[in-house]
Amino acid sequence: MTSIERGRRSGVSPEDPLVKGLARAWGLQRPWAQLIFKLGTGTTAVLSALVVVLICVFLTVFAWPAIRFNGWNILTGTIWNIGNQYGSGSITHNGYSAEPGAQFGGLVFIFGTLATATVAMIAAVPLAFLVSVALVYRVPARIRPLANALVELMAGVPSVVYGLWGMVVLVPWIGTKLAPAATAHLGFLPIFHGDAGSGNGLLAASTIIALMVIPIMVATIRDVINAQATSVYEASMALGSTSWQAVTRAVLPSVRNGMIAAIMVAFGRALGETMAVLMVCGAAINTYPQNIFQSVNTLAAVIVSQLESALTDSSGMAQRSLAELAVVLFAITVVLNMLARGILRGADRSQEAQ
Amino acid sequence: MILRRRRRAAIASKLWWGASLLALFAVIAVLLSIFWFVAARGFPALRPAILTTVTAGTSGGLLNAIAGTFLLVISGMVMVAIVGLGTAVWMVEFASSRPRALVRFAIDVLFGVPSIVVGYSLYVALVEGLGWGFSLVAGALALAIIMLPYVVRNADLALSAVPRDLREAAIALGARQATAAVSVALPWAVPGILTGFLIATGIAVGETAPLIYTAGWSNFLPSFAPTHSPVGYLTYVVWTFISLPFTASHELAYAAAVLLMLIIFVTNLASRTFVEYYAQKTHRR
């Protein structure tokens, strides 16, 4: 029986777009075509799922000599030194060797990654929440599409453009105005104590990261408020609370899960941001920042900034150690993802219990 | 007593709303200042010669980078169109719940993987491991992996939202699973699928980190050779040339930045217009 006959029997017009569409795809009805289609899409799904596994496997296999050579030093060591390339002999550890004097400690970069991301989030989370509620409840409906479009456009600005602006505008301002003033007048606070630095550093990196993640968070929080919290806002107002009390006591609790999800996504982005951070962080090696203005380095940035130097290491251990840093960064982001799922699942369960 | 508390709450409310509006204006002001900064320095640098000549060391034009960006992004899109769309169709139309959850989880994890990690793993595996050198395929593959989660998630959501009665109508007319998927579900889901593609394109155009060690950099027009031939791209110019001590290279960096912003702006605008138009046309019933 053809589709047209079936259609006539069931009273569907042959002019119906549904029937027309079906007629066009009718070649697929053959059993072997069905099978090929199912197998084909299944194969692509397997490929998609394998991508993340393969990334991990490639890096781990390549980094294996470094994992053996470095031991725990990659997580606890402070010094990154590819060793004396012109000396004779080599040093060997756990059966793998590198140039004399080489050691690959990653703690400076792990610290820098967590520090820049955390400082950025401390600024970005409250700001993103304030911006979201302003967008939903205070921006007049007429100009709301424009404001929303601006926020979305901001999320699309490439990280090198943020980095460019940071290098040319933000860093000189911090280096010549903000940092000297803050260290001179507020030096009693530990975060402002000591050398003002050049402007390239923790604060510049965190500011840029915050600017990059705010629009991502605002887009999510705004949608969650619109979807879940309009009725509670009205209800709270009707019960006599002020409009801000309605936000903190009714809206905020009801969008908590959405907030957590948005924060986790943004935190992951903050940990992995490479180019913008690389352009303003000062690319510190072997030192920790003594205050909020001094140079830092992150796992993502160091993989780019140190690869040139690592390629000169004739033992190849530096390159493998960079891969090990990539594995560490990968592990941090995966753990964060799991944590977010755990929190959200727990929150769902406690809501069901209520 | 109660009155005073009320008044205090009313004042606090005004202050907090003031703060939230201030935050909104501040964020938009910073954004506009970044736009202004890029436009004010980029447009004067954007001479016609820049669009028609290739880079000569630290000066010259950007034709190679423009062509390279388009070539890399389009090649990446072709790869992700097949794999990403196939994955989403399989998840929604064929998969049982366990495998579907597994694939969804893998895609979620991929969302969180930093782009430099993707780039470095492909450098290790393809550029060094298989000896392809800096190349078009390695760069395009890196971009495809970056785009994959955006494409899959949006297509997954769009296909899952196809009305049940539409599918049932197709089945009632005798369509088998794959036929119903291709003729009914996919056309209905086009706006959502396309949104995912366009978001992914915007991100791919602006990416740098995954390309540095896969596509490399070239002063010449892309050769279309799949391997052993590096490809230039716009973001590289912004990142590298601004650090050089020459005015000509700074001009190239600003010109590249303004071109990137223009491409992303146009993609964004075009996608919104098309998606709205298509959604109105097909979802009317």
Image (spheres, rainbow, N blue to C red):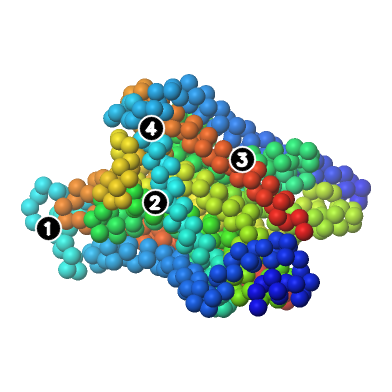
* Subunit bearing disc 3: B
Q: Spatial distance from mark 3 to mark 2, Cα to Cα?
A: 24 Å
Q: Which mark is residue B269?
A: 3
What is the x, y in percent for residue A325? 34, 57
Residue toward you, A110 or B115: B115
Residue B199 located left or right of residue A304: right
Indicate which label's residue lies in the foreground, 2 or 1: 2
| Mark 2 and mark 1: Cα distance apart in space | 39 Å
Residue at disc 2, secondary structure: helix
Q: Secondary structure at mark 1?
A: loop
Looking at the image, is mark 1 or mark 3 nearer the viewer?
A: 3
Left or right side of B267 for A225 = right
**In the image, which is nearer the foreground, mark 1 or mark 4?**
4
Q: Tell me which numbered mark, 3 or 4, is placed earlier along the sequence.
A: 4
Checking the image for residue B9, the label placed there is none
Q: Which element is circle 3 on?
A: helix
Q: Chain of mark 4?
A: B
Q: Are marks 2 and 1 in contact (CB under 8 Å)?
A: no
Whole-Å distance between the Cαs marked 3 and 4?
Answer: 24 Å
Image quadrant where residue B189 sits: bottom right
Q: Residue at x 57, y 78 (%)?
A: B96
Q: Which residue is mark 4?
A: B63
Drawn side of residue B262 relative to residue A295, left or right: right
Look at the picture and state if B251 lies above or below A183.
above
> In the image, what residue type sits under mark 2?
Ala
Dot 1, crowdedness within 10 Å: few (<14), some or many (≥20)?
A: some
Relative image position of residue A122 (x, y in whole percent) = 57, 49
**Disc 2 marks which residue?**
B140
